[in-house]
Image (cartoon, rainbow, N blue to C red):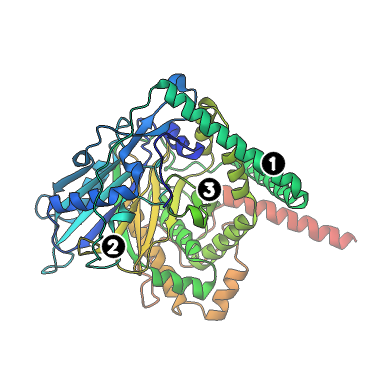
Amino acid sequence: MPHQQHLDRLTSIDASFLHREGDNSHMHIGGVLVFEGPPPAFEDYLEHVRGRLQLIPRYRQKLATPPLQTGRPLWVDDPSFNLEYHVRQTALPAPGSEEQLLLLTARIASQPLDRTKPLWENWMVEGLEPREKGGPERFALIFKTHHSVVDGVSGVDLATILLDLKEKPDRSSQELEAWRPASVPGPADLVLAGLRDALGTGTALAGRAVGAALNPVRTAGALQAAVQGLGELAWAALNPAPETPLNVQIGPHRRFAVVRQQLEDYKEIKDAFGGTVNDVVLTVVSGALARWLRSRGVRTEGLEMRALVPVSVRSEDQRNSMGNRLTVMRGPLPVYIEDPITRLGVVRQAMDGLKESKQAVGASTLAAVNELAPPAILAQASRLQFSTRLFNLLVTNIPGPQFPLYVLGRRLEDMFPLAFLPENHALAVAIMSYDGGLDYGLLGDFDALPDIDLIAQGIDDALAELLAQARGGERGSDSRKKAVAAPGGGGNAAGNGVGESGSGNGRAPASIVPSGSRRSSNGPAATMRAKRSQRRRSSESDDQKS
């Protein structure tokens, strides 16, 4: 595992998460891990954490800013590091329901991390009631780490190193060495360290320039891809995301809801209709949001929301390193399409197009340029990247291990991820697969999303719709595949309706919101239909003349 050095300078992406943070937009991420079995003694858990911290020195380091903000912050050893400050113990009051656990998680997520200390917290929560009456005891671990420390997709964090592959792991024969922090750097040390790192970045860029000169054919292709990518990013910026009830001013307080599902259900749907698990995830989220929007009285005809989808660009040799190796794509959420299979086809087609596009290359190019940018310019670039104009909500799907994990002999039961809310974004959806399960964590603004549970229920209902179709609902297998190969567009799709949830027997129960089966005579969809009709009549007239 690469060593995390004292006086390492933050990358431009890591530093951007510091710049994005505000009083109401906290930039920490984490998760809620639920374990089966009685909680361990707190002293035993503390020793367990202490014994693993040597694997991630960054968790004993804090931020230090060069004088007059002459460069990006650096990581320095914290001479007053106190493990008992970061690892905390609490208990739920009786009855210890999951609802109480989620309320506690929301309150913890509502509090910013102290930037004068290492940027993480870990809570051991006792008193969680059994999942079923008479079942085994349970407890939870809540993790909270600043996004500048780890990207949450494929990096290493505290939860990663605390979990074991075996119920009774082999004891290490190595004795734990006492940790000794490096000496506290002075202002001159911070300036020199920043200059040294900047010089290293410049040298690396110069080396890449020499390599590019020696291979002009490959360089020309890479340059063309970068230019195309920057152009696509500029075009996306000129085509803003629509205004929705999710894009409002947010406060500091949060709500947290979870959904338990099975990964095999998503694989069954993708095998029946094509696409990827991530395509099915975006389709399910679109269905849930459509139902929620209609419950708010928002018309969805012609409305396509946009999700910010983080994509890891971490190479194999960087897989166990700290920091962020991320770029982003802006994926479609076609809430205007009622038929779930047509909706999946549109998502699949759009995501395939994004993968073939150069958006990710353009974002990576901007990140590389930002490595040389001064803090003031980097702060402006960070605000632009997370502008409300570009996307409506964050949707991140994190692939996890498909085998059981343990902490001090207790089996991990659920792993609910916890994302973050940028300014003017009231919802973030994070998904984590683990040991055959697929767990959703929905983080919402407390004031803007009092009905966040409706979105959680909509996720269950949207998945049930797709499963009913995949298992031989209203369409045969040939017509299902045809619908995906040639999806309908616009807002003209007719089907089961996102206001209805599929049941296992292929029959949908009553909708909880009014059905939008009739076409509206006005609104965006009506305008689109009128234009298409006018173009068609004009084309037919030209054909007759010729």
Q: Residue 6 bears which disc, if any?
A: none
Of mark 1 and mark 3, the one earlier in the sequence is: 1
**Residue 108 higher or lower than 274, as above or below:** above
Residues 511 and 31: in front is: 31
Q: Amino acid at mark 3?
A: Val
Residue at x 28% of width, y 55% of height = 162
Give the structural element (helix, strand or loop) at label 2. loop
Q: CA distance from mark 3 to mark 2?
A: 31 Å
Q: Amino acid at mark 2?
A: Asp
Residues 524 and 152: in front is: 152
Residue at x 51% of width, y 36% of height = 12
Q: Amino acid at mark 1?
A: Ala
Crowdedness near tag 1: few (<14), some (14–19) or many (≥20) residues, C-alpha within 10 Å: few
Question: For residue 239, which quarter of the picture?
Answer: top right
* Pointer 3 residue: 328
Drawn side of residue 217 relative to residue 254, left or right: right
Of mark 2 and mark 1, the one earlier in the sequence is: 2
Whether tag 1 and tag 3 are in contact, CB under 8 A, the answer is: no
* Pointer 2 residue: 164
Q: Position of residue 508 (x, y in %)?
A: 38, 70
Q: Residue furthest top?
A: 68
Q: CA distance from mark 1 to mark 3?
A: 26 Å
Give the structural element (helix, strand or loop) at label 1. helix
* Pointer 1 residue: 209
Residues 242 and 19: in front is: 19
Of mark 3 and mark 2, the one earlier in the sequence is: 2
Q: Position of residue 382 (x, y in %)?
A: 50, 34
Drawn side of residue 208 relative to residue 294, left or right: right
Crowdedness near tag 2: few (<14), some (14–19) or many (≥20) residues, C-alpha within 10 Å: some
Q: Position of residue 377 (x, y in %)?
A: 55, 27
